Image (cartoon, rainbow, N blue to C red):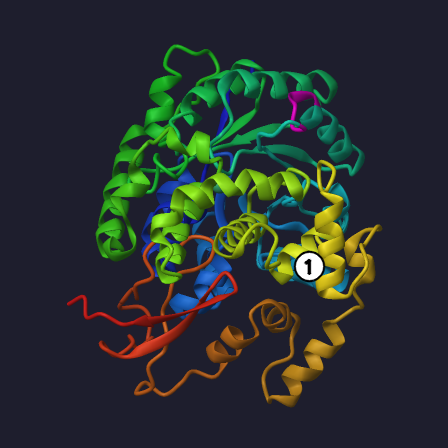
Amino acid sequence: MKPIKFNNTVLRDGHQSLAATRMTTPQMLPAAKDLDELGFGALETWGGATIDSCLRFLGENPFARLDALKPLTPKTPHMMLLRGQNIVQYTSFPDDVVEAFIRCTANHGMDIFRIFDALNDLRNLQTAVRAVKAAGKHAQGTLCFTTSPVHTPDMFVRLADGLADLEVDSICLKDMAGLLPPTIAYQIVRGIKDRHSDLPLVVHSHETAGLAGATYLAAIEAGADAVDCSIVPFANGTGQPDTVRMLALLQGNLRAPVLDLLRLARLRQHFEGVASELASVMSPVNDRVDSDALSFQVPGGMLSNFRNQLKEMKMENKLDEVLSEIPEVRKALGWIPLVTPTSQIVGTQAMLNVKFGRWKNLAQATADLALGKYGRAPGPVDPEVVALAAKSSGQTPVTGRPADHLPPRMATLRAELTAKGLPSDDDTAVLYAMFPRETEALLRPKPKSQPTVASGTAAAASTPRPVTNASTATAAPVPGSRLRISVGGESFDVTVEDLG
Ligand code: CO
């Protein structure tokens, strides 16, 4: 029996889930050697919200982070989370941008690309999987777990058949909201392993509702090859189970990995220091294991983001109503999983339904989703909502692969950069495609006297406060000033407080 691999997520999902993705490269580097020497299956170091956060809040070039980490971690493969055709953004990009992004990232040393689509529409993984394989790297196909009348264990097993047809190198069962119960995990993993024993299978979960540790044990029992763990204080709660805790849960298990506890203790000590530097974005609410997450069915990060948004819309007393509207919206849109970007879209629509009456006010992104612009929904989409979407947007439903309707963009992006007097290499162009303003700001630093805005990310922020950090030259907003910030496509007016 092969030992179970532990992947480590502390440098990506760990701080994305518990510290609004604000860990800086200088805060990571001292941990690199110990992380590398421990013998983890992979280090998740990039992707998800980290690229957005580097550009928007930390004043870092995301590729420079990879360049800094790679030489310090020669023994362990690096892994990133990629949103299929959305890359690391909220909308679809043309194939040539997806391909260029993967080529650039592979050149900077990324080894494993964990690729998912929010709708589990495997057509949205095709281009990315092909590009990763063409770059000679490892393509991990992902199944996003969710619960709904159409999401049976058998449905996930059939989806895994589709991933195998794409010739992925491994499969990830991704439980982004911590909703996967142990017995269901056992059934899905067993089902997949029975049919694809050759494909390594990794399980990714969150401890939000207190299930992940037990779920990992059940998945391991069923034949899973790897699980994702993190390191306290960027573990447990809305993050992955802690590595030492998972080792303890596996004590006596013949497949338990052997990891150096002294190194793990040293890492924990280092990250405790980082957590105290990031205290302003960390909240005890995220550490709380709360089975309420099971009834809300929304990712933990979304819930805290939600509370902020409702407050800004003066709807804080409507939280329960909005939460019970979410299943209605999901059902109408074909029981889509809630993961970036669908979690933001469904959440916003649920708020609009409560504020203005159900389907009285359709957000553009909801219309796009209903019209199939993000891909095919897992269940049937309510025809009335499709009709409304067509009427409000003046567009017709998309039937084929959404990216087939998107013309190539790389040449235009390069030309735009050149016209602005900025570098037009592919690294710059792919970042500019997704984050035009932020990329331009990074390349053309503002004079220090001019304040820049720090705010919450749509994906991860629970407290939209500025993080001050010695490594960045970003000036904090002036206390007392009023700013307009945008969270998940919604604009809010905020007043800046002096937090001392
Ligand atoms: Co996650």
Tag 1: residue type? Answer: Ser
Secondary structure, mark 1, is: loop
Tell me where residue 112 sits by quadrant.
top right
Between 150 and 106, the one nearer to me in the picture: 150
Q: Is residue 249 left or right of residue 77?
A: left
**Any part of residue 14 in sight:** no
Seen in the picture, residue 457 relative to 192 is either above or below; the reply is below
Q: Is residue 496 left or right of residue 293?
A: left
Is 152 in the magenta? yes
Residue at the (32%, 76%) spot, across then down: 473
Q: Which residues are magenta?
A: 150-154
Seen in the picture, residue 294 relative to 416 is either above or below; the reply is above
Residue at the (63%, 38%) spot, across then down: 331
Task: Find residue 309 and report its horizontal and vertical position in percent.
Answer: 40, 57
Q: Is residue 125 left or right of residue 200?
A: right
Task: Find residue 471 and report its horizontal and vertical position in percent.
Answer: 31, 68
Tell me where residue 379 sits by quadrant.
top right
Quadrant containing the N terminus in the rendered view: top right
Quadrant containing the C terminus in the rendered view: bottom left
Is 4 in the magenta? no
Residue at the (37%, 22%) spot, across then down: 247
Residue matched to label 1: 92
Task: Find residue 144 and report its horizontal and vertical position in percent.
Answer: 60, 37
Q: Main secondary structure of the magenta part?
A: loop
